[in-house]
Image (cartoon, helix red, strand yellow):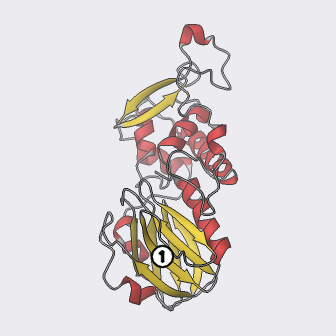
Amino acid sequence: MPELPEVETVKNGIEKFIGNATIVDVNIRNRNFREIVPADTESKIKGTKIKKYRRIGKYIVIDLSNNYSIVWHLGMSGKIKTFSEKPTAPEKHDHIVLSTNHGCLVYNDPRRFGLFSYAKTNQLLMFRGLQKMGKDPFDASLNEKYLFEHLKNKKIPIKPALLDQSIINGIGNIYASEILYASKISPLRPANKISIKECKEIICNTRAVLQKAIDNGGSTLRDYHKPDGSLGYFQNLHCVYNKTGEKCPNCKCNIKNTGGIRKTIQAGRSTFYCPTLQK
C-alpha cells in the first residue's frame, strides 16, 4: 500500500502535471471500490476548476472551485497515470478518467481497495475516512508530550502503535520499521514503555525518514509507481525493511553470531529490525 511519502509524491506529481486545470469530463467506468463511487460524482466535479492540492494522511484531497473536494485513496494497488491527451483505448483496470484542459488523469486499481469520492470542502474532517485522524507527522503541534500521552496506556508493541492512524496519520508498515531502526528502539517493546525522551526521538526520526523518502520519490515496491510511470528510489536506501539476514548499516556486530536483521510478524504485518542495535 502506498504510504505517506508515496501519496505525497503522487499528489505533487499530478499537481505539477495539471495544476489549476478545469475538469472538462469525468468517465467512471467502474464504481465498485472500497466504497461505491457516489452516483452524482460526475455532476459534482465536472466543469469545476482545481484550486488546491492537499494530502491528509494517506488521502489525496483536491479542492475545487465549487467548494467541494475530491477525496482520493489509492488503496492497496491503486495508481494515478498522467497523459497529455485522453487515451483512446483504456488499459485493464483503468476505472476512472479525469480529463482536464491541461491533461488527463487515469486511476488504475487492480484490487479496487481504493476510494474515489467527494465532500464539501468545509466539512472534510467529517468525511468517513478522515474522521478521528491523528496528527500529521509534519504538523508542528506533534511533539513528544502528545505522543507520550497517546502511548502511555497502550500495552501493544510500539511498531503496531505507530501504525495507528488515530495517533499519527500516514505512517505505514515500511516506514514504521525504518523509523524505529533510526530511533534504536525495538519494535517488540510495549508502547507504554517508551519514555518521553524516546518519543521525541521517534518524532524527529519520523520526519527525517519520511522527508528523505519524499525527496527520493518514495519506495517502489510491487504496485507503486509515480504518476509519470517512473520509479521511486527510496527502497534502495532502506536500512532494515525486507533485508532479513543482512547486516544493518550502523551495526558492528558479527552477523554470523547474531543472524543479522530479523523479520517477525506483528498484527499480520512484516517487521524488520536489528536485535543488537534496537533495544
Q: Position of residue 63 (x, y in %)?
A: 52, 80
Tell whether 162 sits left or right of 137: left
Kindly identify the residue that appears in the image at 51 percent across and 35 percent down.
Answer: 195
- As drawn, 185 above or below 2: above
User: How many tags in the picture?
Assistant: 1
Q: Nearer the viewer, residue 23 or 20?
A: 23
- Which picture quadrant has residue 137? bottom right
Tell whether 60 sits left or right of 8: left
Kindly identify the residue that appears in the image at 52 percent across and 27 percent down.
Answer: 273
- Which picture quadrant has residue 33? bottom left
- Residue 186 visible within the image: no
Tell whether 25 sits left or right of 211: left
Q: Residues within 10 Å of mark 1 (few under 14, many from 20)?
A: many
Q: Position of residue 89 (x, y in %)?
A: 49, 72
Q: Nearer the viewer, residue 32 or 272?
A: 32
Kindly identify the residue that appears in the image at 36 percent across and 60 percent down.
Answer: 112
Pointer 1 residue = 97
- Residue 46 visible within the image: yes
Q: Position of residue 67 (x, y in %)?
A: 48, 88
Q: Nearer the viewer, residue 149 or 125?
A: 125
Kindly identify the residue that appears in the image at 54 percent across and 59 percent down.
Answer: 7
- As drawn, 274 above or below 151: above
Residue furthest to the top in view is: 257
- As drawn, 211 above or below 26: above
Element type where label 1 sits in the image: strand
Q: Amino acid at mark 1?
A: Val
Q: Position of residue 52 (x, y in %)?
A: 59, 79
- Which picture quadrant has residue 274? top right
Q: Nearer the viewer, residue 93 or 71?
A: 93
